[in-house]
Amino acid sequence: MAKNINVNTITEEAINLLSAYNVAWKTAPSIRKACKEKIVAAEKAVADIVTKREALIESGVSENEAISKFSCLEENKRLSVAKQEMIDKNKELNAKFSEGRSLVSDDLYNAYILYLTNGDITKFKKALVTFLATIGIIADSEWSKTSKIAQILIANISGSTKATGKSREEGNYVKARAKNAFKDIFVAAFLQFIVKEKGVLDENKDYTLSRHNFDKQEQNNSTTK
């Protein structure tokens, strides 16, 4: 029987890194959509003015007079601001994603590469146990072998991708994930486990994460039934 692990011992530093990633993950779609809508609206405004200007020129008005009457100056400024906002917002989001990825050690990634190239799942499981210890969660080799959660976590993070570029040219059909891609999927899989399935971390209204004692909460719930 698999030994349970106490994930409530996760460190505050790890919670903060997971929180940064979670905020970026949850807000990125709406932020990027809002920025894109501003860009599209500004581009349409510029296009509409250009259309009117061209119609005026075709009617015989000089180009200078048409430009003077239908200037794109303000709309171009608005477009430039909207594009810069998209760049700035993406930088902020990417910084949060990067912060979350820093949770995952290069040693775990190297063990993943060995697993894909040599089929050495044992070292990969040992690296997972070592990683958990660095963030305050004590597990052992027996847990990594028999725990259902361990198997699901490993299954989620250990996949390869279809070969592209140089790897494909070398005759490969699949390749390992790049380091950042591996760390991305690991953090996402870990959040799935520790937030959605295990319920150790609460998601606040602003998508930040905070600790709560799941076991005590379950106990309190059972006494009120």
Image: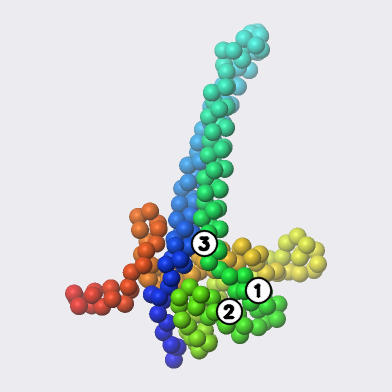
Q: Residue furthest right?
A: 170
When asked about the image quadrant of residue 15, the answer is: bottom left
Q: Quadrant of the N terminus?
A: bottom left
Residue type at tag 2: Ala
Mark 3: secondary structure: helix
Residue type at tag 1: Asn
Q: CA distance from mark 1 to mark 3?
A: 18 Å
Question: Are circles 2 and 1 on residues that touch, CB within 8 Å?
Answer: yes
Mark 2 vs mark 1: which is more N-terminal?
Answer: 1
Q: Which residue is mark 1?
A: 110
Q: Which residue is mark 3?
A: 100
Residue at image location 62% in from the left, 9% down from the top? 65
Q: Which residue is mark 2?
A: 127
- Residue 178: x %, y % from top left: 66, 64
Residue nearer the viewer, 178 or 12: 12
Q: Is residue 77 above or below residue 206?
A: above
Residue type at tag 3: Gly
Question: Are circles 2 and 3 on residues that touch, CB within 8 Å?
Answer: no
- Residue 221: x %, y % from top left: 24, 74
Q: Tell me if mark 1 has few (under 14), some (14-19) or many (20+) residues whose alpha carbon lies within 10 angstroms of its own.
A: some
